[in-house]
Image (spheres, rainbow, N blue to C red):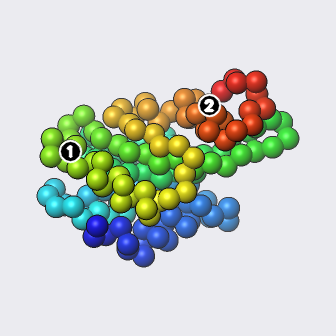
Amino acid sequence: MSGLDSQEIKDAYDAVRSDKDETNWLLISYAAATGRDLKLSGTGKGGLSELAAYLDDGQAQWGYARVEYANDTESKRVKFILVVWIGNSTKVMRKARVGFETAEVKKVLSHHSIQVDATDKGDLDEKDIVPRLRRAGGADYNGGRG
C-alpha cells in the first residue's frame, strides 16, 4: 500500500513509542478522496482527546496512541492502542475497504495492546479505554476498577 512505508510515518511511530518524546499520538488518513494511498495527517502531544478532535466524520482513518495510567500509587503503565475510525459520513466504498487497509496499517503500527474500533469521538474516552488496557495487560492492581 502506497504511503505506509513513508519515512514520515515511521518517524511519527517511533516518536509515539519513545519515552523521550512528548508526541503521544499519530493519525493516518487517505491522501485523496479517491484511491488507496495513505499519508500521515497529524501528530500531537494532547492525548486521546486531541486525537479525537482530528477525526473526520467523512473519512476512514487510523490512529495510534500512547496511553499512560496509574496502576497504583507506586507505578505507572504505558500501553499503546490502535484506533480504527470510520466516520458516520464515510462513503460506502471506503467503509468496504477498511478491513483490507487495517491489515496493512497493522503491519506498520504493529505494537499495540488493543484495537479500538470507533465511529463516535466518544469511543476514545480514556475512562472507557483504560479498563480495557488493564484487562489486556494482565495484572490489575485496582481490583477490576477502571
> From where the camera sits, is residue 51 visible?
no
Please state if 129 lies on the left or on the right of 139 as rendered.
left
Q: Nearer the viewer, residue 56 or 113?
A: 113
**Which residue is pictured at 33% across the width and 34% down the height?**
119
Q: Amino acid at mark 2?
A: Pro
Q: Quadrant of residue 142?
A: top right
In the displayed image of the protein, which residue is found farthest to the right?
74
Task: Point out the image quarter for the N terminus.
Answer: bottom left
Residue 134 in the image, given as x and y percentages of width and height: 66, 36
Say few, some or many: other residues with alpha carbon within 10 Å of mark 1 (under 14 / 14 to 19 / 20 or more).
Answer: few
Residue marked by disc 2: 131
Task: Point out the image quarter for the C terminus.
Answer: top right
> From where the camera sits, is residue 115 visible?
yes
Q: Amino acid at mark 1?
A: Ala
Mark 2 or 1: in front is: 1
Give the secondary structure at mark 2: helix
Residue marked by disc 1: 96
Residue 29 in the image, given as x and y percentages of width and height: 31, 56
Q: Nearer the viewer, residue 87 or 112?
A: 112
